[in-house]
């Protein structure tokens, strides 16, 4: 069974994730804002955002492969979740981007930089422009973009393919690739991105 060896992330409704529209993220942010009494505290903000990075990176650190199945919009904090997954499959008409980069924030996990080359990462982070699934595939940000009606079946096919591989082999393959990116300074970049 693919579900035993592979995690598939998908959104409910019209979007994969429209920012921090995650139940745990919203509750933590609300509690943090109430505690601030209207004053911004950079340390409290750093602690809260670091908590988000740790949550997103739990996908990266999971011994099981994680496939993000992106439909609709995937923006803001939702991109951190998708980009911390191992593989990303998108609907061709889906949109992925980080619009907060235009005015008040950077993606805390900094995964855009590690998944794209310098030119494309800078263009997207400086402009906050989104990419369609087709564009994301062309730039190498995602494994594959397919028509929306084929997305679930395409992801299921890949999950089942991975499920034929022993769990220990999947874990070790993932660890090896992830460690290469960790050696390139991923965690240091995330600290700066969170600050």
Image: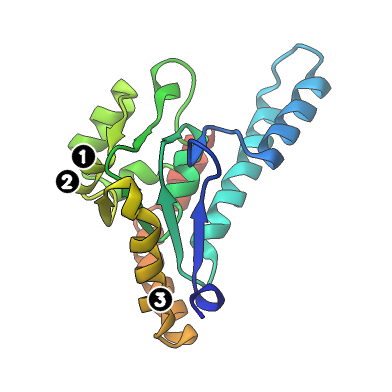
Residue 172 at x, y = what percent?
43, 80
Q: Are marks 1 and 3 in contact (CB under 8 Å)?
A: no
Residue pointed to by mark 3: 160
Residue 83 at x, y = what percent?
41, 49
The disc, 1 or 3, on the residue closer to the chain's N-terminal end is 1
Q: Is residue 183 visible?
A: no
Marks 2/1: CA–CA distance: 5 Å
Report which quarter residue 23 is drawn in: top right
Residue pointed to by mark 2: 138
Question: Measuring 40% from the left and 85% from the top, which residue is drawn there?
Answer: 164
Q: Residues within 10 Å of mark 1 (few under 14, many from 20)?
A: some
Q: Residues within 10 Å of mark 2 (few under 14, many from 20)?
A: few
In the rendered view, tell whether residue 14 sits above or below residue 59.
Answer: above
Question: Measuring 40% from the left and 61% from the top, which residue is drawn there?
Answer: 86
Q: Nearer the viewer, residue 29 or 43?
A: 29
Residue pointed to by mark 1: 135
In the figure, is residue 21 to the left or right of 143? right
The disc, 3 or 2, on the residue closer to the chain's N-terminal end is 2
- Helix, strand or loop for disc 1: helix
Q: Is residue 48 visible?
A: yes
- Helix, strand or loop for disc 2: helix
Q: Are marks 2 and 1 in contact (CB under 8 Å)?
A: yes
The C terminus - image quarter: top right
Question: Measuring 33% from the left and 46% from the top, which residue is drawn there?
Answer: 148
Q: Nearer the viewer, residue 98 or 72?
A: 72
Marks 3/2: CA–CA distance: 25 Å
């Amino acid at each position: 069974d693919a579900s035993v060896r592979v995690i598939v992330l998908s959104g409910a409704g019209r979007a994969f994730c429209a920012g921090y529209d995650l139940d745990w993220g919203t509750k933590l942010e609300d509690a943090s804002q109430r505690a601030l009494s209207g004053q911004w505290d950079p340390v409290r903000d750093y602690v809260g955002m670091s908590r988000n990075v740790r949550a997103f990176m739990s996908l990266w650190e999971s011994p099981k492969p994680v496939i993000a199945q992106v439909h609709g919009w995937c923006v803001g904090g939702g991109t951190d979740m998708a980009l911390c997954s191992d593989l990303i499959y998108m609907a061709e008409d889906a949109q992925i981007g980080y619009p907060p980069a235009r005015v008040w924030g950077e993606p805390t996990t900094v995964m855009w930089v590690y998944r794209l080359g310098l030119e494309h990462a800078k263009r997207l982070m400086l402009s906050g422009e989104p990419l369609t699934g087709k564009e994301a595939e062309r730039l190498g940000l995602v494994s594959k973009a397919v028509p929306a009606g084929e997305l679930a079946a395409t992801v299921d096919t890949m999950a089942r393919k991975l499920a034929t591989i022993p769990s220990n082999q999947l874990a070790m393959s993932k660890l090896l690739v992830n460690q290469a990116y960790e050696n390139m300074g991923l965690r240091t970049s995330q600290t700066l991105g969170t600050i």
